[in-house]
């Protein structure tokens, strides 16, 4: 008998972590920083929320504004994303404009005069990936906030076809909707936005 594996993923905002990607370090020349932060697994970092967040570069010592930092990773739809920003001045922090779901590389175009660390802001978006390939959403459990909103899951990307939407009232509580036994099929991946109405959501899916 064939049994389809059911997985789960929690989407919940987390606090800022200034060295989640790279802890205190410097370089003698242009090159890549070592991704050795607390949120790095197999060479890829995320903020732990399963949603996208902006990236911070903090100057621990020295004026590092003479160096350009290039952050490479993926966006909330899993597409490749790169942004270059000028490094921080003495005791300052700079932040990317783009939100990254994952970070796989941070490079510099020259020697870092002092030392820096690289991390994430507090979770800055409500979007992430349930599963990047064909799947079925089997169920969910949500915790609603005091703000009315909606949980939306789209096919293909964050701008793809909306196949599931579950509203929540402006009241704190739990959301446990019925989803038909066969689930809802997403042919090209399931991409979630938990909006302002949810503090968290756990999604159950094939994968």
Image (tube, rainbow, N blue to C red):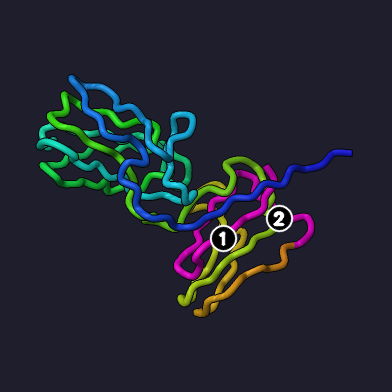
* Rendered image quadrant of residue 65: top left
Measured Cα–Cα span from mark 2 to mark 1:
13 Å
Other residues around mark 1 within 10 Å, as few (<14) / some (14–19) / many (≥20)? many
Residue receiving disc 1: 201
Residue that protrudes farthest toward the top in the picture: 29
Task: Give above or below for 183 relative to 196.
Answer: above
Q: Is residue 16 left or right of residue 166?
A: left
Which numbered mark, 2 or 1, is in the foreground of this view? Answer: 1
Range shown magenta: 180-207
Left or right side of 92 for 162: right
Q: What residue does disc 2 label? A: 138
Q: Is residue 15 magenta?
A: no
Is 153 or 148 nearer to us in this picture?
148
Is 181 magenta? The answer is: yes
Q: Going by the image, does 119 lie left or right of 199? A: left
At 37% from the left edge and 31% from the top edge, which residue is drawn? 36
For mark 2, give the secondary structure. Answer: strand
Q: Residue at x 65, y 45 (%)?
A: 187
Q: Quadrant of the N terminus?
A: top right
The residue sitting at 54% across, 51% down in the picture is: 191
Residue at horizontal 46 percent and vertical 47 percent from the top = 48
């Amino acid at each position: 008998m064939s049994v389809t594996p059911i997985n789960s993923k929690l989407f919940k905002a987390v606090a800022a972590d200034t060295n989640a990607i790279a802890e205190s370090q410097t370089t003698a020349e242009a090159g890549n920083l070592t991704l050795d932060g607390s949120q790095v697994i197999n060479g890829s970092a995320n903020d732990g929320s399963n949603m996208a967040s902006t990236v911070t570069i903090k100057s621990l010592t020295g004026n590092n504004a003479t160096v350009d930092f290039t952050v490479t990773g993926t966006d909330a739809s899993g597409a490749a994303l790169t942004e270059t920003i000028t490094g921080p001045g003495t005791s300052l922090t700079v932040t990317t404009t783009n939100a990254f779901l994952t970070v796989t590389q941070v490079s510099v175009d020259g020697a870092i005069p002092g030392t820096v660390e690289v991390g994430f802001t507090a979770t800055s978006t409500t979007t992430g990936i349930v599963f990047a390939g064909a799947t079925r959403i089997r169920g969910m459990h949500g915790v609603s906030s005091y703000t009315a909103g909606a949980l939306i899951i789209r096919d293909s990307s964050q701008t793809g076809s909306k196949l599931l939407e579950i509203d929540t009232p402006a009241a704190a509580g739990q959301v446990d909707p019925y989803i038909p036994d066969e689930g809802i099929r997403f042919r090209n991946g399931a991409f979630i936005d938990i909006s302002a109405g949810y503090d968290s959501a756990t999604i159950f899916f094939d994968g």
